[in-house]
């Protein structure tokens, strides 16, 4: 009878009762292996039977040299080591385990008998043993201790793996961040090149185009000879399309300045009444041609601090936009009112309206609403974008309201000018 079977109690086939094997709920952690070192096959079988319900892989070693080979091949959650047998010295095996950096912290539970317990405990604990199992061995106690160390090993492995993944992720993140920074620098450089190109080409196109418009006006009004009716018609077409092209160039130039952060306003006292009147005069021919009615409804005290030229441009864009999308017989209304410390300038039309899902995109550059595409209305999608840039440079806001038919665009401008940054 083995020394383990002698101390358990009423022996079964190998010295244990079946009920001793089921009093602890097993914890399944396949990665937490257990090493049993004992030169007695019956002892190893008994220990394996006790630990089997835990579900951990069990490796057996019948000698100290075999145990050393096992330890060098893999890591163990815990080592069960018989202290003294005729063929091996458990303390020498324990010393070897402790001498290796990889297994220096591996828990060692010494197996001993009551007659040698006191002396061997003194030596074992001095060598770093975590516990002793002394006969009589209680299976539930042994499983509980092994399960505890197996759980700790599994957790530590998870932490090690997590740390490894964090290191990999940190390395990859650093590399990705470097690539992103490089791409961002490249994109910024491309943006500057694009802005410079648009700015330069706009300047180059604007000068000869201005000359074309000037000479057309000379030919029309005070040329060397009276143009025929057909020639006048052709000159009118040239002038109209030249002005459209000039407006497009101005829009592109403004967009490039806004993106480069060099689009600014020159603040000075402004009379909005004069701005509205100039816009009315400028749009009168196109309003008449479109068979629309332009109504002006101005409130009192319309003076504010801002850039008159840019405010006139913003209002002109709004009125022109409403005229393009309002059918003959409709009307466009320019109205102003005081709202707190702001002046609200609105342009209301009886046109086809703007779908709700498109309203948030109206002030985005190059965006063209569905109605403009369906009606094949000419435009670049920059008009409302420029309005937004001008209004925001004044410290104000611009928005749209449209339900069903008709739209109302409203600019809210601070009377005292842009707030200090």
Image (cartoon, rainbow, N blue to C red):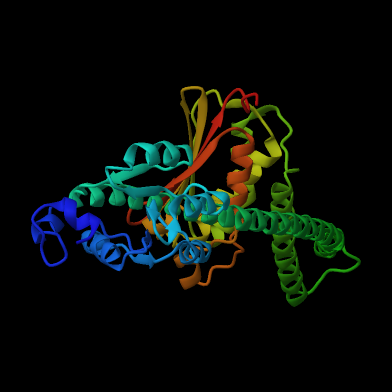
Q: Nearer the viewer, residue 135 or 404?
A: 135
Q: What residue appears at the point 64 percent right and 42 percent down from the top-left corner?
A: 312
Q: What residue appears at the point 58 percent right and 67 percent down from the top-left corner?
A: 378
User: Against 191, is 376 above or below?
Assistant: below
In the image, is 371 to the left or to the right of 164? left
Residue extending furthest right?
Answer: 224
Quadrant of the frame with the C terminus: top right
Q: What residue appears at the point 24 percent right and 52 percent down from the top-left corner?
A: 143
User: Against 372, is 155 above or below?
Assistant: above
In the image, is 258 to the left or to the right of 7? right
User: Against 91, is 61 above or below?
Assistant: below
Q: Nearer the viewer, residue 222 or 134?
A: 134
Where residue 131 sits: x, y (%)?
35, 42
Where residue 99 sits: x, y (%)?
57, 50
Where residue 14 sits: x, y (%)?
16, 65
In this view of the protein, can residue 296 be seen by the observer? no
Q: Nearer the viewer, residue 398 or 420?
A: 420
Picture quarter containing residue 21? Answer: bottom left
Q: Nearer the viewer, residue 182 or 285?
A: 182
Where residue 305 sits: x, y (%)?
65, 26
Picture quarter containing residue 210? Answer: bottom right
């Amino acid at each position: 009878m083995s020394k383990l079977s002698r101390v358990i109690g009423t022996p079964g086939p190998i010295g244990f009762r079946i009920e001793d094997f089921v009093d602890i709920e097993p914890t399944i952690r396949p990665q937490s292996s257990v090493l049993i070192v004992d030169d007695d096959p019956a002892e190893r079988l008994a220990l394996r039977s006790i630990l089997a319900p835990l579900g951990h892989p069990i490796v057996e070693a019948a000698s100290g040299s075999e145990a050393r080979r096992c330890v060098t091949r893999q890591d163990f959650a815990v080592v069960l080591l018989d202290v003294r047998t005729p063929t091996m010295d458990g303390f020498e095996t324990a010393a070897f385990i402790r001498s290796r950096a990889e297994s220096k912290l591996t828990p060692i539970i010494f197996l001993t008998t009551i007659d040698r317990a006191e002396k061997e405990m003194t030596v074992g604990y001095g060598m770093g043993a975590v516990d002793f199992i002394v006969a009589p061995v209680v299976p539930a106690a042994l499983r509980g201790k092994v399960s505890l160390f197996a759980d700790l090993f599994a957790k530590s492995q998870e932490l090690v793996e997590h740390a490894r993944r964090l290191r990999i992720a940190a390395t990859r993140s650093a590399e990705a961040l470097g690539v992103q920074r490089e791409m961002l620098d490249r994109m910024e450089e491309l943006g500057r090149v694009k802005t410079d190109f648009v700015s330069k080409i706009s300047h180059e196109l604007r000068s000869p185009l201005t000359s074309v418009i000037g000479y057309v006006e000379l030919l029309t009004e005070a040329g060397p000879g009276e143009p025929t009716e057909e020639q006048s018609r052709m000159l009118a077409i040239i002038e109209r399309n030249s002005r459209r092209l000039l407006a497009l160039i101005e829009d592109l130039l403004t967009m490039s300045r806004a993106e480069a952060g060099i689009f600014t306003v020159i603040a000075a006292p402004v009379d909005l009444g004069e701005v509205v009147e100039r816009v009315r005069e400028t749009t009168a021919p196109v309003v008449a041609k479109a068979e629309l009615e332009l109504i002006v409804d101005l409130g009192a005290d319309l003076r504010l601090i801002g850039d008159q030229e840019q405010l006139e441009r913003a209002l002109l864009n709004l009125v022109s936009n409403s005229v393009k999308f309002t059918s003959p017989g409709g009307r466009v209304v320019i109205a102003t009112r005081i709202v707190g410390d702001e002046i609200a300038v609105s342009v209301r039309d009886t046109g086809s309206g703007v779908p709700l899902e498109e309203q948030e995109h109206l002030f985005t550059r190059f965006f063209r609403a569905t109605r403009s595409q369906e009606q094949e209305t000419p435009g670049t999608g920059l008009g409302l974008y420029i309005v937004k840039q001008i209004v925001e440079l004044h410290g104000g806001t611009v928005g749209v309201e449209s339900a069903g038919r008709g739209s109302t665009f409203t600019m809210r401008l601070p009377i005292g000018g842009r707030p200090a940054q």
